[in-house]
Amino acid sequence: MPLTDLPITVPVVAAQDATDVIEVVGKRTEETLKIDRRTYQVRETPNSAQKNAVQLLRGLPAVTITPDDRILVLGSGLTRIYVDGRPYIGDASQYLRTVHGSDIERIEVITNPSAQFSSEGAGGIINLVLRKSRVEGLSGNASLEESSYGYALGDTTLNYKAGDWTYQLKGGGNVGTMLRRSYRKERSVGMQDDSPLTVNRETGLHTYAGTVGRLSGKASYKLGARTSVSAQLGGGGGHDIVTDKVDYVAVTPDFTPFSERRRLSSIGSYVTGELSFDHKGKKEGEALNAAVQFYTNPNVHDVTNSRLSDGRHYTLDVRKPSTSIDVQIDWKHPMVAGQLLSLGSAWHVDDTTQIYRFTSNDSDGLFGSDINDAYDARSATLSAYASFQQTFGALTVAPGLRGEANRRQISSPGVATVQISRGSLFPSFHASYRVGKKLHFGTSFSKRIDRVPLEYLRPYGTVEDAYTLFEGNPRLKDQSTNAYEASVQFRPGKIELGATAYLRETSRLWSKSYSLNATGTSVYSYVNAGKSWSNGAQFDLA
């Protein structure tokens, strides 16, 4: 997938005789108007068509995929997934496994996002630009993936184009063991005096398996040469099983060893939909895009059963339906030569309910008392942005400013309602300088935020395992990151050399605070603890 930053490509069909027509096809180089990203074209080859998006991302500079499929850009942070310039609001990790190279036109890696993107997620953004069907009639693809873990994943896509209408039907599912890993921890517990520590070692095997099915349909209509509308509706459901087999081994003689067998059974379903409008103006780079998305889990039921070798056992029964809505509108307007004005606004809502029930046979109170609890939580963010791009010869600069107002509320029976209202400004700046066609320098700055997940703010505690309790902290504040980057790219012919150096400063850093309750069980909560600095560099050769 070579980096695309080339002039307009003009393929020419040579004339065979006097009746042949020479067809010249010019493609807009929209990537040249976007200095905040690197763009990789996905070629229509058997190798790329058969690979899913996770496998394709593994080969990109600045992108790291962990063994449990977490996506890291420049090695750290929470990476947001976008599709056609809009945030994906469902299960992104599952979605990426269902999208294949034949569905993707290009992949945009944005290590330091500009003001036009949501400020959430300090790790960067990966935007998948999907391929539009241009073939009349019926077309499609099917894929099957198998793993030595013992799972199979299959997906099918059918496209039908008739004039100005395009239809798409996608179906698929997976079954079997998706993940298996072993781990090892050591735990030391002591009083604040000089008494000896109690030390034990925890070794475990974690397995994730399940059965999932999904189906979606999409219809697009071309209103004109530069305008289209589309609507999409999909859904699915499944049954996931997560098991942990853990042995607690004594390191010091005052610890009594035991083992735990924990099994989580999760049954859920989801419905998702999208309505979008896309218009390209007569000027290069001019565009108006609007979209409304929703994602809902009407029924998510998690039941955890744990049995310990000393005869204790406990059960967690959690119901947690949720709904997300995202509305977005963007307008890009080229002004005089070398100037591009971008304006936009977005509204995002997350609404969730949790009903929590815990029971155990523990007479010593190590797990705490049996409880029935619940909360309702909502987070709503209204935002607007403006950015302006100006070219001065070989230098292009793009300052931007985004404003966001966020309101969160958590209510629980018998507990005071938690209300949080915060507004912030998020500036960004990008600059690009070209020395001829072979050498390119870039620098950028952006302010980002990681908003506190609603579950971290919940007003009651929950059991995680035989020795760990989690307690919510309604006073926890968002953590903010200032990100600085500098890059250089050199292309002496077919070889490309690149380097990106970064520096990130995070304030109000989230950190785990541990304590022991009266029975010796670890209780942890998230607190804000100072600042952190991270820096590094990425080198790539293509």
Image: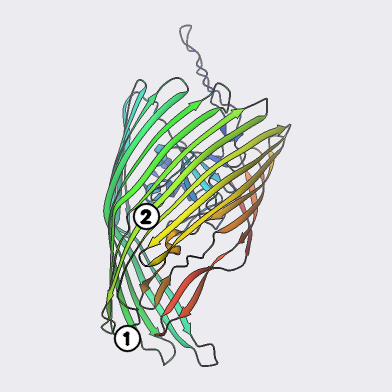
Dividing the image into 4 quarters, which one contains the C terminus?
top right
Spatial separation of the CA atoms under disc 2 and disc 1: 34 Å
Q: Where is residue 292 in the image (x, y as percent from the top left)?
A: 41, 38
The answer to whether 459 is drawn above or below residue 424 in the figure is below
Residue at 64% in and 37% down: 493
Question: Which residue: 35% across, 68% down?
Answer: 206
**Amino acid type assigned to the residue bearing label 2 in the image:** Thr
Q: Label 1: which residue?
A: 364
Task: Decide which of 131, 306 is in the foreground and name it.
Answer: 306
Q: Dot 2: few (<14), some (14–19), or many (≥20) neighbours within 10 Å?
A: some
Q: Position of residue 366 (x, y in %)?
A: 35, 82
Q: Element at badge 2? A: strand
Nearer-the-camera pick, 6 or 399: 399
In the image, residue 27 sits, relative to residue 517, either above or below, namely above
Residue 482, placed above or below residue 140: below
Q: Which quadrant of the figure has residue 68?
A: bottom left
